[in-house]
Image (cartoon, rainbow, N blue to C red):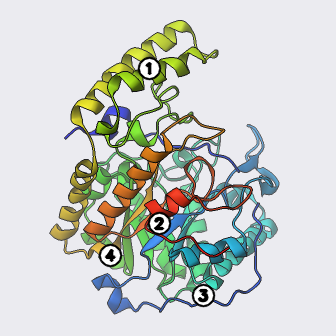
């Protein structure tokens, strides 16, 4: 089986479209039952089907270097933020939790007064989700595109320039969540660690952050992960034995393989093949190499920013990787094979499958902003990944609620029926 992640690298999306509207009218809703410490080890968790709610606490207004602070309020006002009604509709669709990415930069750069305001905003967001009957995984998600408060400076190692500041923030958030959780609110201290899968730096960083979280959040469920961007290979390289000291814990990994499908047309990918890549089918047997290459040539012909030499080199590389893609004929069996690695790891270490969350998966769609996956192919891919995860017993969180990988329109707040169906959900009443 081809290792698509190694072939394409594991650089991610970090551009998508996007203030914190804290929200807070209480909503009467059925609240999921609390979880006990004893149930935690057996996998009786409330997190089963979720969605990421980026950019609720993302898309910031940082000042350029050499400044390291943010305008106030620090989040772009035009970004889409779920309302209380949106959250209620997500619950009615069959989702039971949200994963809430939080950019730590504005918190770390703020003075004490504004940091307290930001913490109150985060409190309000968690309370709004809980009022809608949704569990919450708060994920501290540093922005790799920002010039200062980025993963390299925050947690590339325990000696990173701002690691102690980051560690203190994780502890402070854990303290806030301690008062909210009965197993329904969890903390994920890092998103997609940048260290290599076999790096010794990541286990040391993670243990230090978990230790800090446990000081002020002694019973908050903590979500742990492996290195190399939380990919499958990162989790399967993780030794979970030392982490038992931090129970209750959950494990997570992200799944976007094969990237040639899920990230086709993504302008934020570093590799030059992705920019013009489009019309890659899912499964591969649903199309042909010739049709996809013709679509790539058409996109490249419209590209006035790259030189002809650069486009020629990108096309040659695209042709090579697409030939590998079509020869391999990836389909649902390809996904099952990848996820079996996670199942085998869980079985080896005696970890209940319900404790292993596929924290992100999805694919970029074709719309007014992006030329990417054909939408019927995208729906087939999302359905295959979701069904494969469920067959393996893994909970999941779809990426994303909004923007190019989303399931809800940024403006109208209409849910995409194709994504609702692909996720095995139901359209809520309007």
- Look at the numbered discs 2 and 1 and tell me whether their residues touch, using CB distance below 8 Å: no
Instruction: Identify the residue at horizontal 54%, vertical 7% (top origin).
Output: 308
- Look at the numbered discs 4 and 1 and tell me whether their residues touch, using CB distance below 8 Å: no
* Residue that numbered label 3 is attached to: 179
Q: Is residue 347 left or right of residue 421?
A: left
Q: Which element is circle 2 on?
A: helix
Q: Which element is circle 4 on?
A: helix
* Residue 209 numbered tag: 2
Which residue is at the front of the view, 24 or 117? Answer: 24
Neighbour tally class for label 3: few under 14, some 14-19, many 20 plus, Cα within 10 Å = few
Neighbour tally class for label 2: few under 14, some 14-19, many 20 plus, Cα within 10 Å = many
Mark before the other along the chain sequence, 2 or 1: 2
Q: Position of residue 378 (x, y in %)?
A: 45, 47
Tell me where residue 74 sits by quadrant. Answer: bottom right
Mark before the other along the chain sequence, 3 or 4: 3
Instruction: Identify the residue at horizontal 50%, vertical 45% (top origin).
Output: 375
* Residue that numbered label 4 is attached to: 354
Q: CA distance from mark 4 to mark 2?
A: 23 Å
* Residue that numbered label 1 is attached to: 294
Q: CA distance from mark 2 to mark 3?
A: 19 Å
Q: Position of residue 129 (x, y in %)?
A: 63, 77
Neighbour tally class for label 1: few under 14, some 14-19, many 20 plus, Cα within 10 Å = few
Tell me, yes or no, if residue 237 can be seen here.
Answer: no
Mark before the other along the chain sequence, 2 or 3: 3
Q: CA distance from mark 3 to mark 4?
A: 24 Å
Q: Position of residue 19 (x, y in %)?
A: 77, 60
Q: Residue furthest right?
A: 72
Of marks 3 and 4, the one in the foreground: 4
Mark before the other along the chain sequence, 4 or 2: 2
Of marks 2 and 1, the one in the foreground: 1
Q: Is residue 78 left or right of residue 133?
A: right
């Amino acid at each position: 089986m081809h290792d698509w992640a190694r072939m394409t690298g594991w650089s991610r999306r970090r551009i998508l479209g996007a203030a914190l509207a804290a929200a807070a009218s209480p909503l009467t809703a059925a609240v999921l039952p609390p979880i006990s410490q004893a149930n935690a080890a057996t996998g009786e968790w409330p997190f089963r089907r979720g969605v990421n709610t980026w950019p609720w606490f993302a898309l910031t207004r940082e000042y350029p270097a050499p400044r390291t602070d943010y305008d106030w309020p620090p989040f772009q006002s035009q970004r889409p933020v779920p309302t209380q009604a949106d959250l209620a509709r997500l619950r009615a669709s069959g989702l039971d939790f949200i994963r809430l990415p939080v950019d730590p930069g504005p918190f770390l750069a703020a003075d004490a007064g504004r940091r307290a305001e930001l913490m109150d905003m985060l409190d309000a967001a968690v309370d709004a989700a809980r009022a809608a009957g949704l569990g919450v995984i708060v994920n501290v998600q540093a922005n790799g595109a920002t010039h200062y408060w980025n993963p390299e400076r925050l947690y590339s190692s325990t000696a990173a320039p701002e690691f102690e500041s980051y560690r203190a923030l994780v502890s402070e958030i854990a303290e806030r969540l301690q008062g909210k959780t009965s197993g329904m609110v969890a903390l994920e201290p890092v998103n997609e660690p940048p260290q290599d899968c076999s790096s010794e730096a990541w286990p040391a960083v993670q243990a230090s952050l978990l230790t800090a979280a446990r000081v002020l959040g002694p019973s908050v469920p903590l979500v742990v992960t492996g290195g190399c961007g939380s990919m499958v290979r990162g989790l399967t390289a993780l030794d979970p034995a030392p982490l038992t000291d931090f129970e209750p814990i959950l494990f997570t990994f992200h799944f976007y393989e094969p990237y040639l499908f899920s990230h086709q047309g993504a302008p934020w990918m570093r590799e030059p093949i992705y920019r013009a890549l489009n019309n890659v089918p899912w499964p591969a047997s649903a199309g042909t190499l010739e049709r996809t290459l013709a679509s790539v040539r058409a996109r490249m012909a419209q590209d006035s920013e790259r030189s002809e030499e650069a486009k020629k080199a990108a096309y040659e590389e695209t042709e090579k990787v697409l030939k590998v893609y079509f020869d391999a004929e990836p389909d649902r069996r390809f996904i099952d094979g990848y996820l079996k690695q996670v199942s085998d790891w869980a079985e080896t270490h005696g970890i209940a499958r319900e404790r292993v969350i596929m924290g992100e998966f999805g694919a970029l769609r074709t719309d007014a902003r992006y030329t990417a996956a054909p939408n019927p192919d995208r729906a087939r891919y999302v359905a295959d990944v979701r069904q494969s995860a469920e067959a393996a017993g893994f909970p999941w969180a779809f990426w994303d609620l909004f923007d190019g990988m989303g399931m809800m329109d940024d403006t109208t707040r209409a849910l995409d029926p194709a994504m609702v169906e692909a996720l095995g959900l139901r359209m809520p009443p309007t």
